[in-house]
Amino acid sequence: MSKAIIEQFKTCRNVWIAVAWATESEVFSELLRQENKLRCVVIGTHGSLTAPTCIRRLANSNSVHFRSAKGALFHPKLYLFEHDNRYAAIVGSHNMTRGAFEKNVELSTLSEFDKNDANVRIFRDFIERMAQGPCIVPTQAFLSRYEASYRAAQRQRQTVDDLYDEQPDHTDEKRRRDAPIHMDWDDWLRRVEGEAQNGLARRLQMLDQVQELLQRPEGFLTLPPDDRRRVAGTTTERPRSENDIDWHFFGSMLNAVRFRHTYASLVEKDPPHELAAALEIIPNDTPPTRDDWLEYWGALKSAAGTEGGIGIVGATRLACLKRPDYFVPVTSTNTERLSAQLGVPEEALKSPDNYWDTVIETIILTPWWSSERPSDPQVAKIWDVRAAMLDAIVYDRTAM
């Protein structure tokens, strides 16, 4: 198919193309060589899978349009070539990517049409209509943000590839499935709602407030000191009534203040560049990965320096509050019960280096975590923070 498309490029007069994604390939190189023949080309950006270099190379072409990732997934694969006495159309599964032409299992059909064939007008109308939008303008600012998103998408894809490359450990899989945490969504929800003394409603209220703070422009970096302390768990505020927010859910860090740990001093820095930079490593919207966690933990260790002073509690609290759908805190008040739920020794929970493999990998393989988002708005709010709310099940007031 690569050879067929290149041959069409070389012999045609005009070209129209609509593809979901493009990356560097023989076909893309030929497109650049034949750029004067392009009449209308539409390339998608959903999932940040189109290579940034391809966008940069075509950013100034009036004939090339990049579909916005907003709205319905843009997913066609259509190549239309006009020759002197005929048209040729290639329709099928081939995106303009190296994977499509060199590695994937793909199927497309090349068909020829008379100059006045009605199908030609249908093809051209479709491509030209797609060029009307929604499309993005590939400015330098957009490309800078897009490149970061592209790298994140590549890391996520590598994580999925690694999942299939690794041979399963059947002993480990049996341990996960036998663990109490391996329950369905309804059972999990009953457990969370049944722990009334652990403050379901108040926890949701606290998480809502933290998310509002972290989603402000520049997030943690520009928060006032009192708000930073609230997010970090170092505030000395105590709720005076049931309507007040208890900022010490999900891992109180008051001991870090009492014993002057590095964690507390980093919170007090103005501005708190190190903690803010570490939190930025955890993505806002795309699924975090093991590499994200290890990079985040490495940034915290680097910020602490040789003095240390940042451990599993502070690291997991901040990660949990930024992404409550993935992370649960590990604290002195939940370690024993969390260990029992996960079916792993307590000592295994105390190492940030092993946290992803021990805790997160176990959680995301459970039926309750991977269930569909509920349609009921109130229940959906709990589902959106489901990993963090595991703390409501394992929290032990007597351990305080």
Image (cartoon, grey):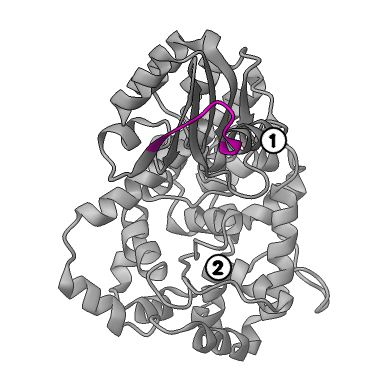
Q: Position of residue 320 (x, y in %)?
A: 55, 59
Would you say 56 lies left or right of 67 here? Answer: left
Query: In the rendered image of this protein, does residue 262 appear above or below residue 16?
Result: below
Marking on residue 99: none
Q: Position of residue 34 (x, y in %)?
A: 46, 11
Residue that label 2 marks: 388
336 sits to left or right of 220: left
Q: Which mark is residue 129?
A: 1
Q: Image point 67% across, 48% down: which residue?
A: 71
Among numbered discs 1 and 2, the one appearing first in the sequence: 1
Please tell me in which quadrant of the rendered image residue 44 appears: top right
Q: Amino acid at mark 1?
A: Arg
Q: Residues within 10 Å of mark 2 (few under 14, many from 20)?
A: many
Range of magenta residues: 110-119
Residue at coordinates 73% horizontally, 63% vertically from top-left? Answer: 208
* Quadrant position of residue 103: top left
**Could you say where residue 79 lies in the image, as x and y percent from the top left?**
48, 31
Instruction: Classify mark 2: helix, strand or loop.
Output: helix
Q: Nearer the viewer, residue 45 or 74?
A: 74
In space, the residues marked 1 and 2 are separated at their CA atoms by: 45 Å
